[in-house]
């Protein structure tokens, strides 16, 4: 980035930091050095990295819960350390991986707490506040849970209620730590698509810490990849995938990201059988041999669709099966 474009981007970013040292005091522990980032309005950014690398520590620096050991974080060009808690809460909403202690509270009451920066601690909701609570309950598909106590919710429902509370805060910056951790397959996409939609529709800057590469690739505008003792790497997810940079999320040489599917898999064993047939079928047969390197490998495998069938070719015969389970059973009977 040259200097002129750098200045332009700094002006546009909602959160900006350069060359931070992140860590803890008493005793002083340095976790990450030289960390720089810009979070832009209208974008959903996913922060990814191995366990313990310092993602939550970075969030705590942005939130001023644990200020950086060196450097400053700017929220709308204002140093976060000079903002009061109330000023920060109006600009920035957070969903952390917190345990809810007050299980007696209802979902409606929890979400209404999101309006506190706007109502004051009296907690009296104006009609506009009540409308906002209703709107976010609808948006997150939990209106039917409004009067349920938090203690009576599943982990995923509680997580969604916390997200609704943050949305009710109606801030321009939203930060979420592993929001999809407890959600089922559909809801992890639903919630992330909702966050993406909010980023676009109301020009919010949204930062999500996640370990879910599939959801991040599907929804994020930007990825921030955090590695031990390295500067933060930021980029468009598709560029990072094509450039092989996503592989940085998997230190060591045991696991590999397939740049075509974006899926994580064991590094290919030296030899896989020769498989002919449509790629959407042959890839799943290949998957079986990757998972079961001990399986007897025929000379050639041919797979076909409609009706589904697999032909296994041996030096002097052909065996036909009609499912992958049947293929595995058959190959297990073969001497290795
Ligand atoms: N309050 C603290 N005091 C000292 N060290 C801490 C504190 N909290 C976390 N750490 C350490 O900081 C390092 C980074 O932790 P952090 O929680 O930021 O990692 P993370 O990337 O969010 O990990 P995960 O993916 O497992 O959530 C870890 O080594 C952790 O032990």
Image (cartoon, rainbow, N blue to C red):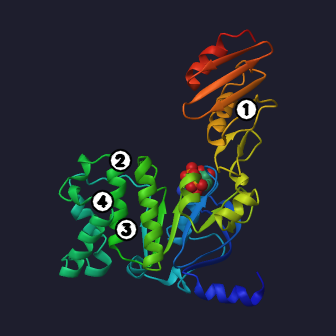
Within 10 Å of the Cα at label 4, are there few (<14), some (14-19), or many (20+) other Cα atoms? Answer: some
Give the label, 2 or 1, closer to the camera: 1
Look at discs 2 and 4 and give the one toward the viewer: 4
- Characterize the local packing of mark 3: few (<14), some (14-19) or many (20 or more) Cα atoms within 10 angstroms: many
Instruction: Name which of mark 2 and mark 4 comes first in the sequence.
Output: 4
Q: Residue 291 location, x and y as percent?
A: 66, 29
Residue at coordinates 44% horizontally, 55% vertically from top-left? 97
- Where does the N terminus fall, quadrant-wise? bottom right
The CB of the residue at mark 4 lies under 8 Å from ligand 1: no
Describe residue 200's horizontal placement relative to residue 272 as left or right: left
Q: Earlier in the sequence, mark 2 or mark 1?
A: 2
Q: Is residue 72 visible?
A: no
Work out how far the residue at label 2 is from the one at label 1, CA to CA, in angstroms. 43 Å
Q: Which mark is residue 166?
A: 3
Q: Is residue 91 visible?
A: yes
Q: Which mark is residue 275?
A: 1
Disc 1, SS:
strand
Label 3 residue SS: helix
Q: Nearer the viewer, mark 1 or mark 3?
A: 1
In percent of width and height, residue 35 lies at 68, 69
Closer to viewer: mark 3 or mark 4 = 4
Per the model, the C-alpha gap separating discs 3 and 2 is 17 Å
Dot 3 or dot 2: first in sequence order is 2
Which residue in the structure is indicated by mark 4? 141
Q: Quadrant of residue 20?
A: bottom right
Task: Give SS at disc 2.
Answer: helix
Mark 1 vs 4: CB contact within 8 A: no
Quarter residue 54 falls in: bottom right
116 lies left or right of 125 = right
Q: Could you say which disc has been placed on residue 155 in the image?
A: 2
Residue at the (67%, 25%) spot, across then down: 292
Estimate how packed mark 1 is, as few (under 14), some (14 to 19) or many (20 or more) residues with alpha carbons within 10 Å: many
């Amino acid at each position: 980035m040259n200097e002129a474009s750098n200045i332009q981007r700094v002006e546009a970013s909602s959160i900006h930091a350069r060359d931070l040292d992140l860590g803890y005091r008493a005793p002083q522990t340095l976790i990450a050095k030289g960390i720089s980032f810009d979070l832009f309005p209208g974008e959903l950014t996913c922060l990814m990295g191995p366990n313990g690398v310092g993602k939550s520590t970075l969030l705590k620096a942005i939130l001023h819960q644990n200020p950086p050991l060196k450097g400053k974080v700017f929220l709308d060009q204002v140093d976060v350390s000079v903002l009061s808690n109330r000023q920060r809460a109006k600009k920035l909403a957070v969903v952390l991986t917190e345990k809810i202690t007050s299980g007696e509270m209802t979902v409606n009451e929890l979400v209404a707490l999101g309006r506190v920066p706007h109502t004051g601690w009296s907690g009296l909701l104006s009609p506009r506040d009540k409308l906002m609570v209703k709107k976010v309950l609808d948006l997150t598909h939990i209106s039917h849970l409004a009067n349920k106590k938090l203690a009576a919710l599943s982990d995923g429902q509680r997580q969604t209620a916390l997200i609704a509370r943050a949305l009710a805060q109606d801030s321009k910056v939203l930060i979420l730590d592993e929001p999809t951790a407890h959600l089922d397959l559909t809801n992890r996409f639903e919630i992330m698509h909702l966050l993406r939609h909010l980023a676009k529709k109301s020009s919010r800057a949204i930062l999500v810490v996640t370990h879910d590469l599939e959801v991040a690739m599907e929804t994020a505008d930007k990825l921030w990849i955090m590695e031990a003792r390295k500067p933060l790497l930021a980029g468009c997810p598709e560029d990072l995938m094509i450039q092989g940079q996503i592989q940085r999320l998997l230190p060591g040489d045991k696991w590999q990201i397939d740049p075509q599917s974006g899926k994580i898999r064991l590094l290919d064993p030296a030899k896989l059988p020769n498989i002919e047939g449509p790629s959407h079928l042959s890839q799943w047969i290949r998957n079986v041999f990757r998972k079961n390197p001990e399986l007897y490998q025929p000379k050639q495998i041919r797979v076909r669709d409609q009706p589904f069938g697999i032909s296994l070719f041996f030096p002097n015969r052909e065996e036909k099966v009609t499912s992958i389970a049947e293929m595995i059973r058959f190959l297990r009977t073969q001497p290795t």
